[in-house]
Each structure stands twice: as structure tokens, then as C-alpha cells.
């Protein structure tokens, strides 16, 4: 490797081997394309059936690696979940995942719902977003009670406030914990740990491995 070559790592990562935060691990990748053009539906079968049923919400469909995700505005989220449960037989929501895209201006916080139809053995995802300055999303607990603790965890880790949740409190971190640890703008930190006579410093004080 020449002096001008940048060190490379696994999974296409370029740069140092430091994985201790948002600024330390970067990877260039292309996001899946969305079917934003009216009338364009590059899919068929039951994918089209669901897309047609959700047309009222103006949902954007994304197909990536054979899986279907619908991006909906948070104002239409509960309507979409209701239709998926009651009309399309997606009886189970196995959870909601939080994601923090710091570069997605005005839509930095994403909530992703994972739905399963036990009747038809089908899976689909519903994704909605909110800005950092207004991190509110309606709670889906009234439609899918299984979301109760999942929404609490997403609130705890990402700071997404699920309006209407029956008891939105932290579930992993102490109640007085500052910030939300899985956000990409969360500061690194920690305490020194002694291990068999050796001391492991916090991530932000470790030496560089470059």
C-alpha cells in the first residue's frame, strides 16, 4: 500500500479501524430507490395488492433485496397500520426500530415497523420520520399492543416521543440518564475499567490505531 492509499477495512469501510462513533466509521453506499413517480409500480403480486390498498396515504414504496417498505408521513401512520391489520391481515407487529440519519435534513429520526401476516406468511415494513427538533410520532400501541415496550426502548435509545403511549418511560437506561445513547450525535464517553490488572480507558481517550 502506497503512502497515498487510504486504509481499508471490512464491509467496504475506508479510513482507520476506529469504530467508536459516528465520525469514526464511514461507508459510502447507495440508498434504495423510491417509486415516487405516480403510476410507476415496478412490482406485482401481493406487493401491488398492498400498494393499491395504501394509495390513500400517498406512501412511497421501496423494494430492496426482495423486501417491501412503505414510507409514510407520520400524520397517516395510524391509518396505514389500521388498514394493514384489519384489511390486509398483518396480524402481528414484531417491533419498531429506531434509526438516526443525521444527514436527512428535517427527517433525521426514523421509526420502522416490522409487520407479519401469519395468515399469508408475508412480511412488510412501514417507515415514518420526524425531525430532531420535533421528534413526535403517534403511538401504535392501540393497534398493535406488542409495540408497548418496543416504543419505550426506541424512545429510550433514540428520543422519539410516541404520542398517546400509555406509559412512555425509559426501559433500559436510568430515568435521569442524559440523552439517548443510540443517536449518532450522542457523545462518546465511559469510565475506566480494570480487567486483570490492565486498565481500559473510555473510547474517547484511547490511543489512535492509524
Image (cartoon, helix red, strand yellow):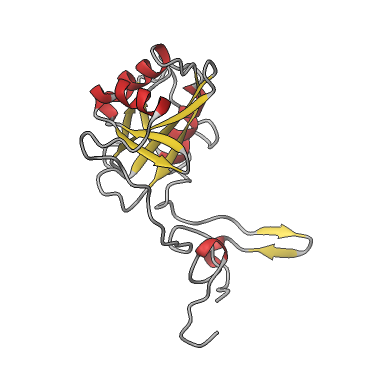
Image-quadrant location for residue 63? top left
Q: Is residue 180 left or right of residue 8?
A: left
| Residue 48 position within the rendered picture, expressed as x and y whole percent measured from the top left | 35, 27
- Vertical placement of residue 166 versus 162, above or below: above
| Residue 189 position within the rendered picture, expressed as x and y whole percent measured from the top left | 51, 56
Q: Residue furthest front?
A: 44
Give me the residue at 39% from left, 35% from top: 69
The quadrant in which the C terminus is found is bottom right
Q: Residue furthest top?
A: 86
Nearer to me, 18 or 50: 50
Nearer to me, 168 or 48: 48
| Residue 151 position within the rendered picture, expressed as x and y whole percent measured from the top left | 45, 28
Q: Residue furthest right?
A: 196
The quadrant in which the N terminus is found is bottom right
Q: How many marks?
A: 0
Residue 187 in view, yes or no: yes
Amino acid at each position: 500500500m502506497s503512502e497515498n492509499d487510504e486504509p481499508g477495512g471490512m464491509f467496504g469501510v475506508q479510513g482507520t479501524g476506529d469504530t467508536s462513533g459516528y465520525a469514526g466509521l464511514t461507508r459510502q453506499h447507495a440508498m434504495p430507490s423510491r417509486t415516487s413517480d405516480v403510476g410507476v409500480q415496478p412490482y406485482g403480486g401481493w406487493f401491488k395488492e398492498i400498494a393499491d390498498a395504501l394509495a390513500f396515504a400517498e406512501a412511497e414504496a421501496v423494494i430492496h433485496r426482495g423486501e417491501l417498505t412503505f414510507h409514510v408521513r407520520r400524520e397517516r401512520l395510524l391509518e396505514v397500520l389500521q388498514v394493514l391489520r384489519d384489511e390486509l391481515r398483518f396480524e402481528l407487529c414484531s417491533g419498531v426500530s429506531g434509526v438516526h440519519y443525521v444527514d436527512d435534513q428535517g427527517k433525521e429520526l426514523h421509526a420502522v415497523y416490522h409487520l407479519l401476516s401469519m395468515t399469508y406468511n408475508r412480511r412488510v415494513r412501514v417507515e415514518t420520520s420526524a425531525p430532531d427538533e420535533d421528534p413526535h410520532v403517534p403511538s401504535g400501541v392501540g393497534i398493535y399492543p406488542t409495540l408497548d415496550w418496543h416504543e419505550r426502548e426506541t424512545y429510550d435509545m433514540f428520543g422519539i416521543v410516541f404520542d398517546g403511549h400509555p406509559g412512555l418511560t425509559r426501559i433500559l437506561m436510568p430515568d435521569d440518564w442524559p440523552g439517548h445513547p443510540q443517536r449518532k450525535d450522542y457523545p462518546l464517553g465511559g469510565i475506566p475499567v480494570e480487567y486483570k490488572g490492565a486498565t481500559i480507558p473510555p473510547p474517547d481517550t484511547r490511543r489512535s490505531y492509524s
